[in-house]
Image: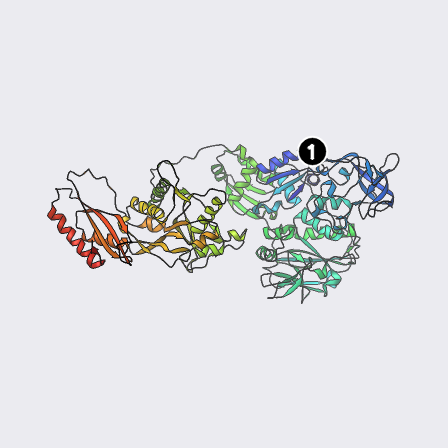
Amino acid sequence: MKVSYKWLKEYLDLSDVTPAELAEKMSRTGIEVDDVIYPGKGLSKIVVGETLSVVDHPDSDHLHVCQVNIGAGEPIQIVCGAPNVAGGQKVIVALHGARITGNAKIKKGKMRGQESNGMICSLAELGYSESVVSKKYADGIFVLPADAVPGTEVVDLLELDDAILDIDITPNRADALSMRGSAYEVAAIYNKALKFPEAPVSEKTGSVADYIKVAVEDTNDAPAYHIQVIKDVKIAESPLWLQNKLMNGGIRPINNVVDITNYILLEYGQPLHAFDYDQIGSKEIIVRRAKENETMTTLDGVERTLDTDNIVITNGTAPIALAGVMGGLDSEITDETVTVALEAALFNPVLIRKTAGKFNLRSESSSRFEKGINVATIRTAGQHAAELMHELAGGTVVAGTASVDTVEVKDTEVVITLEKINRSLGTDISSDEVTAIFNQLGFASTFDGETFTVAVPPRRWDISIYADILEEVARIYGYDNLPETLPITPALPTALTPKQHTMRITRRFMEGAGLTQNISYVLTTAEKAREYAVEDKEGIRLAWPMSEDRSTLRMNLLSTLLDNAAYNVARKNTDIQFYEIGRVFFPSADRVLPIEAERLAGVMTGMAYQKDWQMAAEPVNFYHAKGVLDGYFETMGLSDQIRFEAAKDLKWMHPGRTAAVYLGDAYIGYVGQVHPATANAYDLKETYAFEIDFEAIIAAPKEVITQQPIPKFPGVTRDVALLVDETVTHQQIVKTIKENGGKFLKDVHLFDIYQGKGIEDGKKSVAYSMSFLNPEATLVDEDINKAFAKLVAALETECGAAIR
């Protein structure tokens, strides 16, 4: 909302308050002012000129040589290229030495041999945005009213000496989306008297019943709907004062009738719509829901296909406007309009928002209907607009209003105690001070010695409960005046939850293993959300994503980690070891909100070790990634419950270098090489990854790790070399050894694996070292031989091994 400082001064005395001070004060009391804009800042020596004669430039097909009266001395000659320049116009002239927008300086010179002593300006050259310049003057100079006096300062004439407060309105303070609403706010802040000029009153004629009647099918869609008729209007340009107010408020002038509706929008915050009465096509207006696939053409010339969530204004049969959003093309105000049907209404905010969003037609009107309007001034705003059409367009207001109105205009009563105010704010404000604050706000109140009963007028529809009253008292009293006190709370011993404890250990281990923590967006593309997810479910898409790249809640961590790895590799950071603990999201048929699950994932690519004086460089491989998980599971006390099995069904992972991870009998994740095709899609070389169900890790019973004393008795080692089928896994062999090695077996270590010369095809040779220890006595050969014989027999039977 752009609030004009000069316009505010029409309502209250601000002679002792500068625009900058006002902006600071408003920001400190709850309405943030983003900026104070001074439209005329830097402009100088720009005056009204009168074109006495305009002739074509002898050496150009588009330039004109103009003789211009600037109100002093002889006329000056200016060469102008604007297509709409003509003799007898009042124009904007930047004299020699003038400064226009961008601090550009105007100097005397020659254009193709003709002397030019200044510049005839367009509004853009004075800093006006293209969006607020009338289309009539969009491609040329701006023509001032005929009564403009040559030599007059244009900065004053166009009210560029104003200050515009650019206010960032929060949804709860939509009452400030109008000049009157902002004036109430300023009056409350400074405790100043407020007076609004009375609207003009004209003599009425006839009866509106002879022209039109209205009906509303569902008053929940349109609780209030009013139509007035103004006949014999003459469409023309608006007076300059009205155009100035609209342009300073960020609205493009169009014609006097449409400009009046926009002026009322800025002043009251009440959207209005003007129909060409003769183009409505009937003497009846019905407000209803659109029918499915019903069509209409809006003012922008686009045919819209409607649905039952859209409220439409109809002539009894066909739609003539999208209620609260945009009018219809067939009934728009044109230069031929002579009778105006003026609409002032209140529409359902939810439906207006849906309609504006569906058609991408967000406007000043729709935003106000969405956030709320002052129901007490709906009729007043419409009547004021009708009188201005009489005054500025020569129209005659037809007596009466065709209405459907179910809105009850009344104050909202809120009760709060003085003790509650002081206890909540930490203050010791007296009842008289609180009453004075209510008076500043314009709220009637009574106090019975303990409790305030506050009557909140309809213009503050954001206030309904005692907490709202507390906020009003606090901000008018002054947030800076509230005492600074620390809360007094008992000190309670705290401890980490199991989840926090597990997460902390996990972070320490991963970072100790050389991985760097990532914190990624939970939003990704719909394809990535599903493509790398083990669960076969549809992703949860945002209703209004900011971009397609961030449109869907992730169902895996791998996609965002691969994005991060690709981002780094593209910037020459090629050795990547990332991990992330984060949430993934799944839809649920049994609940509205998605299921959220914690995951642990990692990505590794590039070199695991760099070349140095004592070792060669080594790229990341499967065993680096699996080794990280092995160490992690051991740290967590889960290594005895974990097993790895070959996995070939994950399409984004290499089918020969991927293992599924099981905790007991439950699948909890995978580790392995990212499929080369997937890695290539991210411009990555050989890449390894893992993703684990972190919640399963948290919930699993863990072995308690305790410190053991150094054993007093020596241990014994035995080695065994086996010839097995190449399909037999290391996991199978180790499991068999541990199950049959007896109670003194402490460790199993693979120290050799061989395939090649001397080993038949389809076979492999593996060699294991086994450590035995009795912490209570010295082991004897008989104990070891018995256990060793048992495990060898088990290997031959269960694994088909041959002892070499």
Q: Is residue 442 left or right of residue 680?
A: right
Nearer to us in this view, 536 or 287: 536
User: With respect to residue 397, does 118 lie above or below?
Assistant: above
* Amino acid tagged 1: Ser
User: With respect to residue 397, does 172 lie above or below?
Assistant: above
Nearer to us in this view, 355 or 538: 538
Check the picture and name the quadrant holding the N terminus. top right
Picture mark count: 1
Residue 689 coordinates in the image, percent (x, y): 39, 50
Quadrant in which residue 472 is drawn: top right
Residue 799 coordinates in the image, percent (x, y): 23, 58
Q: How is the image coloured?
A: rainbow
Mark 1, residue position:
15
Residue under the image location 63 percent in, 66 percent down: 294
Q: Is residue 87 left or right of residue 216?
A: right
Residue density around tag 1, few if under 14, some if 14–19, many if 20 or more, within 10 Å: few
Q: Tag 1, which secondary structure?
A: loop
Nearer to us in this view, 299 or 159: 299
User: With respect to residue 664, does 773 lie above or below?
Assistant: above
Nearer to us in this view, 356 or 573: 573
Q: Is residue 686 left or right of residue 358?
A: left
From this viewpoint, which residue is outermost toward the front? 757
Using the rendered image of the protein, determine whether residue 432 is visible from the camera's viewpoint.
no
Residue 795 coordinates in the image, percent (x, y): 20, 56
Residue under the image location 70 percent in, 50 percent down: 262
Q: Is residue 1 left or right of residue 392?
A: left
Residue 602 coordinates in the image, percent (x, y): 39, 47
Using the rendered image of the protein, determine whether residue 288 is visible from the camera's viewpoint.
yes
